[in-house]
C-alpha cells in the first residue's frame, strides 16, 4: 500500500471510529457462506447464533453486533477487500471467521495497519500468527494433530508409516510435522504422496500404499467427496484391514453418514468430538438441537467458531468506557483460560496459540449409528511448530 493510500485508509478508519454508535461494538465475520465450503460457513453462523442465544448480545458495557461477509470459495484477494470494507464502511472493531489459511494471511497487512484484533476460527497454518500481533487462534495449529498422529502411532507400536496428504499448504505441514515426530520416536517413513486437491480418483495412490505394506497410514484431506473416495479406495485394496489408518478431521461427526461400513475402525486426531462428556458440551449440543433440529450433529467447525466468540466477548468485556482499545482487547485474552465444549482451553500469552486437548477418536458403530469415540487424550498440547521453528 502506498503512503498516500495508507494515509487515506487511516483517515477513513478514524472517521469510521467516530461514527460508531456509543455502546455498540461491531464484529466482522468473513466466512464461506456459499460455494464449495458452504457447510463450514453454515457451521460458523450456527455457532455464533448458539453463543448469542446462551449469553445474550451484551458484554461489559457494550452490545455486540455481527456483520457477515461471504467469500464463496478460495479467494484471498476478496478476503482482504472484505476486511477493508468491514473496517472502513461497516466500522467493525474486531474480525473473525477465516476458514482457509490463505484468507487470513491476505488480511494481515490490513489488520496491522488498522490494529484490528482478529480471531481465527478455523484456519490452521502455523505461520499466520507471526504475521500480525493482532491475530489469535481459536482452533488448532495443524502441527498439533499431526504430532498426536505420530505419538499415537508410536505408542501403538507402529514402525512403518505411509503419509498421504492433499497437495496444499496444510497437507505439507502435516507431512513435515508427522515425519519429524515419528522419526524422533524411532519410526520409518516407507512412502509418501501429495495428492491433487482436484481429484476423487485415489485408486493409484491406494495401490502404492498397499504395495508399500506399511503398518500405519497417516492422511489429511478436505472433508466431503475427496475423503469418502480416498477411504473407499483404501478399503478396496484391503489397507483398512492390514494397517492402522489415522486421519485428522475427514471422519468428523457431521460427515459420517457419507461413509459406508468400511470406515469403522479408522482413527482421527482432532480437538473435538460430539461424544465428549462435559457440562459445556452438553449445553452446547442441546441449544444446537433446539435451534437446528434433533438430528443436528455438531462438528469441529462448530466448536472452534464457538470458542472464537468466547474470546471476542472477553475482548469486549475488557473495554470499559471510552473508545475501543485494540491493545486492551489483545491483552485481555493473552493467558486467558476457560472450559469449552471441547475441554480446557488456554491462550498462550507469548504466541497467542490455543493450548488444548487433542483427542484420538475411532469410528465405531454404536446402536446401529456411526460415531467417533475418544480412545486417547493428549492433554493441553502446546505449539510444536514454534519449538521446531524458533524466531
Image (spheres, rainbow, N blue to C red):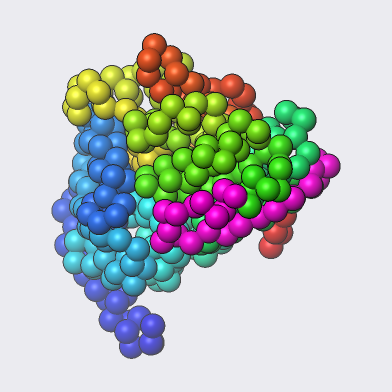
Name the residue: 60% across, 38% down: 239
Q: Position of residue 379 (x, y in %)?
A: 62, 29
* Residue 215 visible at all: yes
Q: Position of residue 330 (x, y in %)?
A: 46, 50
Name the residue: 35% across, 35% down: 258
Magenta segment: does it hold 192? Answer: yes
Q: Position of residue 358 (x, y in %)?
A: 57, 33
**Relative to the observer, which residue lies in front, 65 or 162?**
162
Q: Is residue 164 above or below residue 73?
A: above
Q: Which residues are magenta?
A: 183-207
**Relative to the observer, which residue lies in front, 175 or 2?**
175
Q: Quadrant of residue 184?
A: top right
Q: Quadrant of residue 287?
A: top left
Q: Which quadrant of the rendered structure holds the N terminus?
A: bottom left
Does residue 175 appear left or right of residue 203 in this picture? Answer: right
Q: Residue furthest right?
A: 186
Magenta segment: does it hold 286? Answer: no
Amino acid at each position: 500500500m502506498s503512503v498516500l493510500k495508507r494515509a487515506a485508509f487511516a483517515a477513513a478508519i478514524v472517521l469510521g471510529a467516530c461514527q460508531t454508535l456509543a455502546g455498540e461494538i461491531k464484529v466482522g465475520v468473513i466466512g464461506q457462506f456459499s460455494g464449495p465450503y458452504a457447510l463450514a460457513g453454515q457451521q460458523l453462523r450456527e455457532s455464533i447464533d448458539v453463543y448469542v442465544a446462551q449469553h445474550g448480545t451484551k458484554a461489559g458495557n457494550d452490545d455486540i453486533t455481527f456483520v457477515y461477509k461471504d467469500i464463496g470459495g478460495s479467494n484471498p484477494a476478496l478476503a482482504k477487500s472484505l476486511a477493508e470494507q468491514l473496517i472502513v464502511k461497516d466500522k467493525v472493531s474486531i474480525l473473525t471467521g477465516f476458514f482457509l489459511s490463505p484468507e487470513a494471511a491476505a488480511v494481515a497487512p490490513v489488520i496491522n495497519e488498522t490494529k484490528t484484533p482478529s480471531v481465527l476460527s478455523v484456519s490452521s497454518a502455523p505461520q499466520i500468527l507471526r504475521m500480525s500481533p493482532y491475530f489469535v487462534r481459536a482452533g488448532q495449529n495443524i502441527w498439533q494433530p499431526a504430532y498426536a498422529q505420530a505419538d499415537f502411532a508410536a505408542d501403538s507400536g507402529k514402525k512403518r508409516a505411509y503419509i498421504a496428504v492433499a497437495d496444499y499448504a496444510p497437507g505439507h505441514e502435516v507431512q513435515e510435522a508427522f515425519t519429524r515426530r515419528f522419526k524422533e520416536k524411532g519410526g520409518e517413513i516407507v512412502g509418501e504422496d501429495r495428492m491433487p486437491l482436484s481429484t476423487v480418483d485415489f485408486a493409484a495412490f491406494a495401490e502404492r500404499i498397499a504395495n508399500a505394506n506399511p503398518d500405519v497410514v497417516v492422511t489429511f484431506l478436505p472433508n466431503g467427496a475427496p475423503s469418502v473416495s480416498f477411504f473407499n479406495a483404501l478399503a478396496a485394496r484391503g489397507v483398512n484391514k492390514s494397517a492402522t489408518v489415522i486421519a485428522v478431521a475427514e471422519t468428523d461427526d457431521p460427515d459420517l453418514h457419507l461413509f459406508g461400513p468400511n470406515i469403522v475402525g479408522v482413527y482421527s486426531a482432532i480437538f473435538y468430538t460430539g461424544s465428549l462428556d462435559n457440562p459445556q458440551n452438553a449445553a452446547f449440543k442441546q441449544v444446537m438441537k433446539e435451534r437446528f433440529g434433533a438430528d443436528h450433529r455438531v462438528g469441529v467447525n462448530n466448536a472452534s467458531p464457538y470458542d472464537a466468540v468466547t474470546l471476542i466477548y472477553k475482548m469486549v468485556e475488557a473495554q470499559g468506557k471510552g473508545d475501543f482499545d485494540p491493545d486492551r482487547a489483545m491483552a485481555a485474552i493473552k493467558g486467558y483460560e476457560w472450559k469449552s465444549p471441547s475441554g480446557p482451553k488456554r491462550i498462550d500469552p507469548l504466541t497467542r496459540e490455543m493450548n488444548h486437548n487433542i483427542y484420538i477418536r475411532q469410528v465405531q458403530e454404536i446402536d446401529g449409528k456411526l460415531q467417533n469415540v475418544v480412545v486417547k487424550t493428549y492433554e493441553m498440547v502446546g505449539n510444536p511448530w514454534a519449538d521446531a521453528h524458533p524466531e
